[in-house]
């Protein structure tokens, strides 16, 4: 099976002038991967050309299962023969069909090679699409941008498929790819992390302009990711322009027949990214203004059961959907660090913004939206890490109202597997909060701390939360990135204290 799927005899039959036919079999998305492979080879044996949908489905499943040899066979050996087969059908729409097949398979190849960190091959397929006169879709652009965020990946100069146009599209001035300083070199020398972040953000802007120029309407996911890139690159003015000028104009230009797709509706996550970015760069008044716009204009529309957002998340419970709407309520503040091990507070935060977040939590309650995990974590950071609001009783009550293992059955929320990272983060904050109390008690009481009733009680709390933390962390680790692992890990100093207590 790992060998050639289109036999040499099939190639000879084609050469002898036998015509292929298009397969009109229904969408094979419900077939298992082995069934889909068999269906594919059987179709090829009958000289039937699989539909675009089924072919892409097959390639995606092959990639997800790590069946690289089969994927390479289909793309590099079979696909050119399938294109020849299409040409042999003699249909009036053959040229458009061939173009659609190429675009679909090449797009799939961009995402696949990007996921394998094969930058040269990914760029090669990107260039094929550009040279064909169109432009890769949002998802392929994101795949490349994510790859190029990785430090060790060479940074290429991409063709955006356009001349030095000076026209403004949807309020956006032409944006161009950064160029190599060395003539003929297709790679740019990346000098530092901030330089790479700036290059990736500039590439994202250039992609946005080309997407708009080719009417490959960017999805909300693309916009949300681009805003994240602009925020990391500290390009606040560009972010503000994209969010408040380009996005509304572009979304308003989308043809009616696809305009109502949930892919193009500005999501709560994108609103959150924009508002958070303004807070991060100190534009607090603008962040407040955008939040008010979200709460008054956008959120009520997203809340409607008939909205595109509701349709996109129809598999979620109504409470889970409402919790997603609450994300922007917790975008006002960043608390970078908790209590240091010596008991001193080294948290970095703006107290005024901390107060603002507590106010927004109350507004969320008034708006009858459930508190999302992101809100729980930020409030826990306040109650366990901000001196002015340090309150472990409030932290206990908050997490007990969130963690399903503490809730009454009728009130419990189902914790998804991907939630374990956030849940573990919550447990870590609880452990650190009580460790800070323990450290302070130990310093104040001296040797008497060994028998002090208050210290005994603190130790009980620490043991309890460590016993919650460790199994949750074991479940979360396989799903975590490097940075994700850091946020659910205690420091060596913390562990030393814990060992002393346990």
Image (cartoon, rainbow, N blue to C red):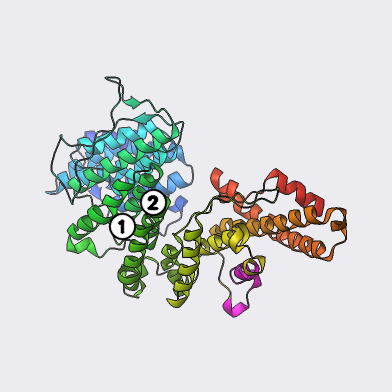
Which residue is tagged 1? 25
Highlighted magenta segment, given as a residue range: 396-411
What is the magenta segment's predominant secondary structure? Answer: helix
User: On screen, 428 above or below 260?
Assistant: above
- For the N terminus, the quadrant is top left
Residue depicted at x 34% and y 70%: 302
Q: Position of residue 415 (x, y in %)?
A: 57, 65
- The crowding category of the residue bearing disc 1, from other C-alpha atoms within 10 Å (few below 14, some 14 to 19, many at least 20), is few
Residue depicted at x 50% and y 64%: 355
Q: Secondary structure at mark 1?
A: loop
Q: CA distance from mark 2 to mark 1?
A: 10 Å
Residue depicted at x 56% and y 71%: 413
Between 408 and 88, the one lying in front of the other is 408
- For the C terminus, the quadrant is bottom right
- The crowding category of the residue bearing disc 2, from other C-alpha atoms within 10 Å (few below 14, some 14 to 19, many at least 20), is some
Q: Quadrant of residue 411?
A: bottom right
Q: Quadrant of residue 145?
A: top left
Residue depicted at x 50% and y 69%: 371
Q: Quadrant of residue 404?
A: bottom right
Q: Position of residue 110 (x, y in %)?
A: 35, 40
Q: Is residue 178 magenta?
A: no
Q: Which mark is residue 209?
A: none
Q: Earlier in the sequence, mark 2 or mark 1?
A: 1
Q: Residue 126 vs residue 353: left or right?
A: left
Q: Secondary structure at mark 2?
A: helix
Which residue is tagged 2? 39
């Amino acid at each position: 099976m790992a060998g050639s799927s289109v036999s040499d005899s099939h190639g000879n039959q084609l050469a002898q002038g036998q015509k292929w036919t298009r397969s009109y079999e229904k969408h094979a998305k419900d077939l298992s991967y082995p069934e889909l492979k068999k269906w594919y080879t059987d179709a090829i044996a009958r000289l039937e050309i699989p539909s675009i949908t089924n072919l892409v489905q097959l390639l995606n499943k092959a990639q997800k299962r790590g069946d690289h040899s089969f994927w390479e066979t289909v793309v590099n050996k079979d696909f050119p023969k399938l294109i020849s087969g299409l040409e042999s059908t003699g249909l009036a729409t053959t040229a458009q069909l061939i173009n659609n097949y190429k675009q679909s398979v090449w797009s799939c190849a961009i995402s696949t090679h990007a996921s394998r960190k094969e930058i040269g091959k990914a760029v090669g397929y990107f260039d094929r699409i550009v040279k064909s006169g169109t432009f890769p879709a949002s998802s392929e652009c994101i795949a490349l941008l994510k790859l190029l965020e990785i430090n060790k990946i060479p940074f290429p100069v991409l063709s955006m498929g356009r001349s030095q146009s000076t026209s403004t599209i949807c309020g956006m001035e032409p944006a161009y790819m950064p160029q190599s300083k060395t003539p003929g070199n297709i790679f740019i020398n990346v000098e530092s992390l901030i330089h790479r972040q700036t290059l990736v953000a500039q590439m994202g802007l250039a992609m946005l302009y080309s997407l708009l120029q080719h009417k490959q309407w960017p999805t909300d996911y693309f916009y949300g990711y681009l805003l994240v890139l602009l925020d990391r690159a500290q390009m606040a003015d560009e972010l503000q322009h994209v969010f408040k000028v380009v996005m509304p104009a572009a979304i308003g230009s989308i043809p009616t027949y696809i305009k109502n797709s949930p892919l193009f509706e500005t999501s709560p996550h994108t609103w959150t990214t924009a508002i958070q970015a303004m807070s991060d760069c100190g534009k607090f008044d603008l962040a407040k203004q955008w939040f008010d716009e979200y709460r008054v204009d956008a959120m009520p529309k997203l809340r409607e059961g008939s909205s595109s957002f509701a349709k996109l998340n129809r598999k979620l419970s109504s409470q889970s959907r409402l919790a997603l709407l609450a994300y922007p309520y917790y975008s006002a503040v960043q608390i970078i660090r908790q209590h240091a091990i010596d008991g001193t507070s080294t948290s970095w935060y703006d107290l005024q913004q901390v107060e603002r977040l507590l106010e927004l939590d109350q507004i969320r309650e008034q708006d009858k939206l459930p508190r999302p995990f992101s809100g729980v974590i930020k409030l826990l950071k306040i109650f366990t890490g901000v001196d002015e609001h340090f309150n472990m009783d409030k932290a206990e009550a908050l997490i007990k109202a969130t963690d399903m293992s503490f809730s009454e059955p009728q009130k419990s929320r189902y914790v998804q597997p991907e939630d374990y990272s956030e849940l573990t983060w919550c447990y870590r904050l609880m452990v650190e909060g009580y460790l800070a109390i323990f450290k302070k008690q130990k310093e104040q009481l001296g040797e008497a701390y060994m028998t002090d009733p208050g210290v005994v009680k603190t130790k009980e709390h620490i043991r309890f939360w460590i016993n919650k933390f460790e199994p949750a962390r074991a479940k979360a680790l396989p799903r975590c990135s490097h940075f994700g692992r850091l946020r659910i890990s205690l420091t060596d100093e913390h562990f030393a204290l814990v060992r002393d207590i346990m």
